[in-house]
Image (cartoon, grey):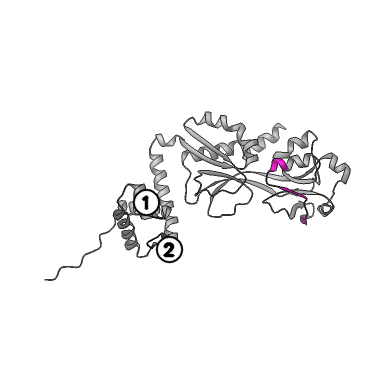
Amino acid sequence: MPAAPAQRRPQTAMNKLQAMEVFAKVAETGSFTRAAEAMDLSRSATSDHVAELERHLGVRLLNRTTRRVSLTSEGQVFLERARQVLDLIGLAEEEASVGALTPRGRLRVNAPVSFGQHYLAPLVSTFLARYPEIELELVLTDRVVDLVEEGYDLVLRVGRLPDSSLISRRITTSRMVLCASSAYLEQHGTPRHPADLARHACLHLIGTAWQTWSFEGPDGAVSVPVTSRFTVNNVDVLMQATLDGAGLCLLPLNLAQAAIRDGRLVEVMAEFRGRELVLHAVQPPGHLPVPKTRALIDFLTEHFGPRAQRNEAREK
C-alpha cells in the first residue's frame, strides 16, 4: 500500500513568531550567517525558519544569491508588518513586567545644534534627575541623520518631515518673524510690504526654501522671491549676522524674542506673519515608544508644548 503523502506541519503561534524574528534579522543584516550569529542559531536552522515561513505564506520573501540576500517586493511589505507585530509583542512583554514600566537604559537622541544648545542643554540635569535609570546620549548636528542606520532611539527635527514612514509626534510650533538690527534699518530703510524685500539684503539658512519667503498678511497669503548674499547652515551664525546689521532674516520667534525685547533686533512687518516652524519627535519606522523614549517625549511636551507656551505667555 503506498505511503500517504507527507502533510505540511502547521505553524504554531510561537513557531510563526520565531520565524518572523529570524526573517527580520536576516533582512536587517542582509545575511543568513550574520543573522544566525546574532540570534545564536545554526545557519541551517536560520535558513529553515525563513523557508518554513515562505511555505506558510505561499510567497518568496527573499532573493538569495551566493553573494547577498535581498527582499522581494512581498518581503518588503511583510517585513514592515512583521516589525510592527514584533514591536507590539515586545512592548506588551515590557509592560507586563512592573520593572519595565520604569524608564531605563541608554537613550540615544539627535537634535539640531542650536535647539540643543539653547533649549535642551538647560534641561538635561532636570531630565536625568527625574529619570535616574536612563543614560542619555545626545548628539547635536544640523544634517539629516538616518535613524535606523545610525541607531538613534529618537530624533528631534525642526520643519517639514521628508519621510512619511517615520513615526512622529508634534512637540511644539514657533512662528517665523522677520527681523533686522536698528542700524541696518536706519541705513537701508524699513520694508512695509513683502514686495519691498526685493530691495533689501536677505539672509537665510541653508536647507530651507529660501528663494521664496511666504507670509500671511491682512489680505491673505503673500509669497515673494528674495535674493541673498549670505547663506549659512547654523541659525546662531545667521542670527549673529542679523544682529551685526548684515541684512533682514526670518528667525524663529522663540529664538529671536529676547533680542527683540531688549532692542538688539527689530521685528519688521509684524502684520505679515511668517510660516510656522514645527518641532517633531521622530522615531524609526515600525518602532513603538518604549518607556525611556516615552519619558523624553512627554518631558519635552511638558516644557515646550501648548500648555507650556500658554503659561509662558501669561507670565509675560
As drawn, the residue found furthest toward the left would be 1
| Quarter residue 308 falls in | top right
Which residue is painted at 53% across and 31% down in the image?
Answer: 128
Residue 186 seen in the current view: yes
Which residue is painted at 75% across and 39% down in the image?
Answer: 240
As drawn, the residue found furthest toward the front would be 67
Q: Where's residue 192, x and y in %?
A: 85, 49
Q: Where's residue 281, x and y in %?
A: 56, 44
Q: Is residue 234 magenta?
A: yes
Q: In this orientation, which residue lies closer to the viewer: 66 or 243?
A: 66
Per the image, label 1 sits on a secondary structure element best described as: helix
Q: Where's residue 276, x and y in %?
A: 69, 48
Query: Gap in Å between the C-alphas at discs 1 and 2?
Result: 18 Å
Quadrant position of the C terminus in the picture: top right
The residue where tag 2 is placed is 72
Residue 252 is marked as: none
Per the image, label 2 sits on a secondary structure element best described as: loop
The residue where tag 1 is placed is 35
Q: Where's residue 271, x and y in %?
A: 80, 47
| Three-letter amino acid code of the residue under disc 2 | Thr
Q: Is residue 69 magenta?
A: no
| Quarter residue 46 falls in | bottom left
- Between disc 1 and disc 2, the foreground one is 1
Q: In this orientation, which residue lies closer to the viewer: 315 or 215?
A: 215
**17 lies above or below 259:** below
Instruction: Give the residues drawn in magenta, as a range.
Output: 220-237
Q: Earlier in the sequence, mark 1 or mark 2?
A: 1
